[in-house]
Amino acid sequence: MGGAIDWYSLFVPSMHLGEVVLRGTAVYLFLFFLLRIMRREAGQLGISDLLVVVLIADAAQNAMASEYRSITEGVILVATIALWDYFLDWLSFRVPALQRLLRPAPLLLIKNGRLQRQNMKREMIQEEELMGQLREKGIRSAGEVKECYLEGDGRISLIPRNAKGKKV
């Protein structure tokens, strides 16, 4: 492990920083809209949260492993991804017309104890997967549910029925 540290190559970019920003932007937007078209899967992490974590981890790993020639390129790429995530959140908050495109509306999965199979089919949610999510919330059967939604961030939310069939 002899030799001196090459400080120049450590911090001076080997490619144009605009290319780094463009690459980060293209990959982020492509994956965001691809996952948006596929909508989301019933789970605990939102798509954009998961996407940011994965892309930032990969970008940081590449910078640390010298797949980029400099730390600067990795930092710029991570910043680009984080800024796009922030900007899309900001845009969906500030421009209500774009909110539906950027953040899908809740989708009804159960209404008055009945599975909404057409909606489940559209999102490719298996009955077993949905029932597993309900059991995690203490619900044994769809009959115990007044309404159940697949939220825009991929979470399952529900309104249970009490013994008289009223909301709890």
Image (cartoon, rainbow, N blue to C red):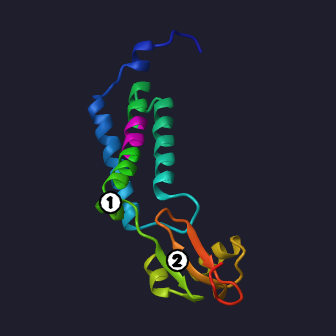
Q: Let me know if residue 20 appears in the view.
A: yes
When the figure is inspected, residue 67 is found, relative to residue 25, above or below; the finding is above
Residue underneath mark 1: 96
When the figure is inspected, residue 162 is found, relative to residue 18, above or below; the finding is below
Residue 82 belongs to magenta span = yes
Residue type, mark 2 in image: Ile
Numbered disc in front, either 1 or 2: 1
Quadrant hosting residue 113: bottom right
Q: Are marks 1 and 2 in contact (CB under 8 Å)?
A: no
Quadrant hosting residue 143: bottom right
Q: Let me know if residue 70 appears in the view.
A: no
Residue in the picture at 51% in, 58% down: 46
The prevailing secondary structure element of the residues shown in magenta is helix
* x then y, percent, for residue 81: 40, 42
SS at mark 2 in the image: loop
- In the image, is 18 to the left or to the right of 103? left
Q: Quick one: which residue is furthest to the top in this view?
A: 4
Q: CA distance from mark 1 to mark 2?
A: 28 Å
Residue underneath mark 2: 125
Residue in the picture at 57% in, 88% down: 112
Residue type, mark 1 in image: Pro
Quarter of the picture containing the C terminus is bottom right
When the figure is inspected, residue 121 is found, relative to residue 45, above or below; the finding is below
* Classed neighbour count for the residue bearing mark 1: other residues with Cα under 10 Å, few (<14), some (14–19), many (≥20): few
Question: Going from the N terminus, do you reach mark 1 or mark 2 first?
Answer: 1
**Which of 165 and 127 lies nearest the eye of the viewer?**
165
* x then y, percent, for residue 29: 33, 51
Residue in the picture at 51% in, 68% down: 41
* x then y, percent, for residue 106: 46, 71
* x then y, percent, for residue 156: 57, 70
- The range drawn in magenta is 78-84
**Which of 76 and 93 lies nearest the eye of the viewer?**
93
